[in-house]
Image (cartoon, grey):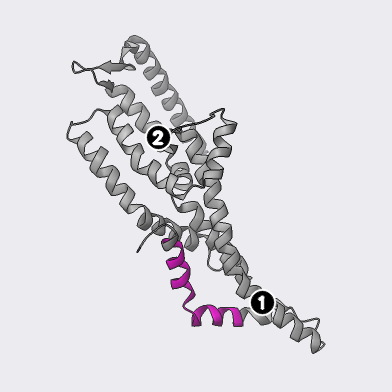
Amino acid sequence: MKNNTLLSVLIILSSLLVSGNVIAADDLSMSALTLITNPDGSQEYSVTLQILIFMTALGFIPAAVIMMTSFTRIVVVMAILRQAFGLQQTPSNQVIIGLTLFMTIFIMTPVYNKIDEDAIQPYLADQLTSVEAIDKAKVPLRAFMLEQTRLKDLNTLANMAGIEQVDNPTDLPMTVIIPSFVISELKTAFQIGFMLFIPFLIIDLVVASILMAMGMMMLSPMIVSLPFKLMLFVLVDGWNLVIGTIATSYGMGT
């Protein structure tokens, strides 16, 4: 009962705060949400609009991390590898996502350093406006995505968007580059996953054939083949090979 009363009070207070903010917003001039032209001709978002954009961007950070970085390729490869083992919960989802996240940070560090050097630090030093900083930050990220994107995927999305021809792929809008990048990442991830799946599939076939020849059809081949697959993976230092292959596919260490 006390919890319900406390919840009701919080809801009422929240409603009052929201209504107060709405009234205050009505009293203020909406000119704060404008694009200001500086004396030198450059344009700058107002402080209010910058805060609004920043708070809105926080909700898109997970999607940006997944769709605009190496996260997609790594997590798909890890999921296929776990399926090749025949394991449903080992490694757990938390371990896979954690490893994928830190591998993404490792691979994307050069891109972030470039963004920090060209956009973030000059903006913090008041050398760039927010509009110019955003334009500068796009360049390294767009270059990274285009480097991993197949031309066929770019052409397909560009044709669907009604873009007939551009002089340079960098002239394409981000709305075309991002989905093209994701499609290419998925294809590459499936190609790597296919190569990882073959050795484990061969072990499953050999074990299943031996069990059938011995008349042990009631025994699941997955149970018998699992130790052999784990042993093979450990003997060839599988984790090192998988992580190294993924990093090399992004040009790391070359």
Residue 72 is situated, as x and y percent measured from the top left of the image, at: 50, 52
Please report whichever mark, 1 or 2, sits nearer to the chain's N-terminal start. Answer: 2
**Mark number, residue 202:** 1
- Residue nearest the viewer, comparing 64 with 253: 253
Residue drawn at the location 55% of the way across and 82% of the way down: 231
Q: Is residue 88 visible?
A: no
Q: Are marks 1 and 2 in contact (CB under 8 Å)?
A: no
State which mark lies toward you, 1 or 2: 1
Q: Quadrant of residue 253?
A: bottom left
Residue 204 is situated, as x and y percent measured from the top left of the image, at: 68, 77
Residue 95 is situated, as x and y percent measured from the top left of the image, at: 48, 63
Among all residues in the image, which is located at the extreme bottom?
214
The three-letter code of the residue at mark 2 reads Ala
Q: Quadrant of residue 249?
A: bottom left
Q: Is residue 81 above or below residue 56?
A: below
Q: Is residue 180 left or right of residue 14?
A: right
Residue drawn at the location 57% of the way across and 60% of the way down: 191
The three-letter code of the residue at mark 1 reads Ile
The answer to if 33 sits in the magenta stretch is no
Residue 151 is situated, as x and y percent measured from the top left of the image, at: 52, 44
Residue drawn at the location 26% of the way across and 38% of the way down: 119
The segment highlighted magenta reads: 228-247
Whole-Å distance between the Cαs marked 1 and 2?
Answer: 47 Å
Residues packed near mark 2 inside 10 Å, few (<14), some (14 to 19) or many (20 plus): few
Label 2: element kind: helix
- Residue nearest the viewer, comparing 141 with 120: 141
